[in-house]
Amino acid sequence: MKNLLIVAATVALALLSIIFLSPWPVWLGTLAAWVTTGSFCLQVLHIIKNKDTSGLSLGMWAALFFGVSCWTWYGHRMSDVPVMAANGITALLALTVIMLKLWHERPMRNPNRRRLVRMPRVILRPRIRSLRPLVEPRARRRQKRAS
């Protein structure tokens, strides 16, 4: 139910923003840029908090980094500050996610790995082919009974 309310509120806010900010396209674009950038900021905070990047696609984040880097340069060339700033921050956030994914999924050496040392007359891997009950020789049994 909570998720449904979040989606409904988001759709309502999007429609209201479009209706009221249509006469001022720069303000609408600025709002859209900062909300989009904020969503990536939330993703980075979620990754830092949970330290889990297993569900993220490295290829998708690399493509996103490439795209927003190009948009940043486009905003710079067109002197469009909202496009340049929002996409520049998003590029840094995407690069942060890429680095966190590579860091959290790096191969780890086991620091507790014990090394086996061969010692004379010590069997490290015993191989038991058949189990037989341990039967004491008759002479020992007789000595125990006599004592």
Image (cartoon, rainbow, N blue to C red):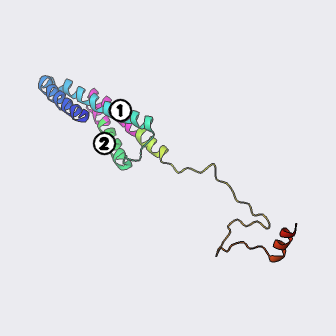
Q: Is residue 79 visible?
A: no
Q: Is residue 87 visible?
A: yes
Q: Position of residue 37 (x, y in %)?
A: 31, 32
Residue nearest the viewer, comparing 92 with 123: 123
The total of numbered circles placed on residues is 2
SS category of the residue bearing label 1: helix
Q: Position of residue 57 (x, y in %)?
A: 36, 48
Residue type, label 1: Leu
Residue nearest the viewer, comparing 137 with 45: 137
SS category of the residue bearing label 2: helix
Residue beneath the point at 53% across and 51% down:
107
Q: List the residue tagged with mark 2.
A: 67
Relative placement, left or right, of 112 versus 97 is right
Residue beneath the point at 55% across and 49% down:
108
Residue 100 occupies which quadrant of the picture? top left
Relative placement, left or right, of 139 versus 106 is right
Stretch of the chain drawn in magenta:
72-95
Residue nearest the viewer, comparing 2 with 136: 136
| Residue ranking furthest to the right | 147
Q: List the residue tagged with mark 1.
A: 42
